[in-house]
Amino acid sequence: MKPKHGNLGAIRIGSATAVEKQLDQLETLLNTFIVMVLIVLVASANANKELELLGAKIETNGAYGVVVSIFAFVFLGLTHICWKIGDLIDSCDDPEANRAVVTLFTHKWMLNPFVYTGPHPASIANCALGAALLVLSWWLGLASLALLSGITTSPPAKDLTNTFLRYLYMGLGLTSLLAICRVFKVVFARIGSERSGDERCLRSSLTWAVFAKCLCSLVAGSIGWYLYYAFAHVGM
């Protein structure tokens, strides 16, 4: 007989605690990324001869490949962890799924793209901030790479490996977005559409919340693209 939805034999691997641990990892990963972006921006703007990342000092002239590799790894991690979050919520039984979704919505991480605190329009707009800042952080990473490329001895654009890594960073930004969307898809599936009136209201307000997140992310992306364009020209 085919097992019911969310079963792994007799084992339920999904739980609110497991989801919280994954979100904690995301918080640490992205906070570290933002610190590294700021370090690269400041070092590149000041044309420093070396910069320090993760406790290691790197000559600025040869730093581009190292920096873009680290940045790409961050968004590989984001994709990987978000996919696991979706799997964990999907594998919960119904009572635990409710707790897992609440954990997802209310985690303390400021850049949490999944945050949701209520149906009021002001609350929905406020909850879109995390997703917008997450998108902006990706663009700031790209902008810092553009600025760094302007102070290297050998232009990264002419290095096939660095060019590949730059496009890998861009591609992993897209896969991260798709993994985040998948988490929302799983959440909507767990809420359902033919249940109680309260759950239908939640589904409706959450739909508006996702729309607000998309809209604010587009605005943040526009700002980020402008910064990237400006920094790329400064670095030329």
Image (cartoon, grey):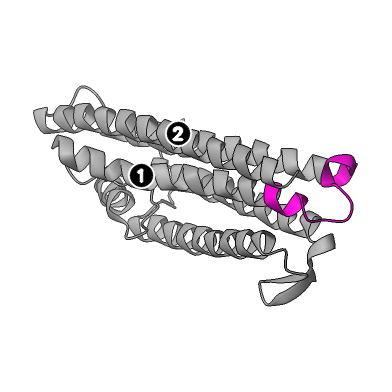
> Which residue bears the numbered disc 2?
181
Determine which quarter of the picture holds residue 189: top left
> At which x and y percent is residue 199?
17, 32
> At which x and y percent is residue 178?
52, 33
Q: Looking at the rendering, in which quadrant would you find the C terminus?
A: top right
Residue 179 left/right relative to 98: right
Determine which quarter of the picture holds residue 172: top right
Which amino acid type corresponds to the residue marked 1 in the rendered image? Phe
Which amino acid type corresponds to the residue marked 2 in the rendered image? Cys
> At which x and y percent is residue 148?
72, 54
How busy is the neighbourhood of tag 2: few (under 14 within 10 Å), some, or many (20 plus)?
some
Residue 53 left/right relative to 94: right
Q: Nearer the viewer, residue 65 or 197?
A: 65
Magenta stretch containing residue 148, yes or no?
yes
Magenta stretch containing residue 71, yes or no?
no
* First in sequence: mark 1 vs mark 2: 1
Determine which quarter of the picture holds residue 3: top left
Label placed on residue 114: 1
Residue for point 53% across, 59% down: 34
Q: Nearer the viewer, residue 29 or 187?
A: 29
> At which x and y percent is residue 129?
33, 45
| Whole-number angstrom distance, CA of label 1 to CA of label 2 | 10 Å
Is residue 109 depicted above or below 226 in this figure? below
Q: Nearer the viewer, residue 28 or 13?
A: 28
The stretch of residues the image draws in magenta is 146-161
Q: Secondary structure at mark 1?
A: loop
Q: Nearer the viewer, residue 39 or 174?
A: 39
Residue 152 left/right relative to 10: right
Q: Is residue 8 visible?
A: no
Residue 124 left/right relative to 37: left
Residue for point 78% across, 70% down: 49
Is residue 202 depicted above or below 32 in this figure? above
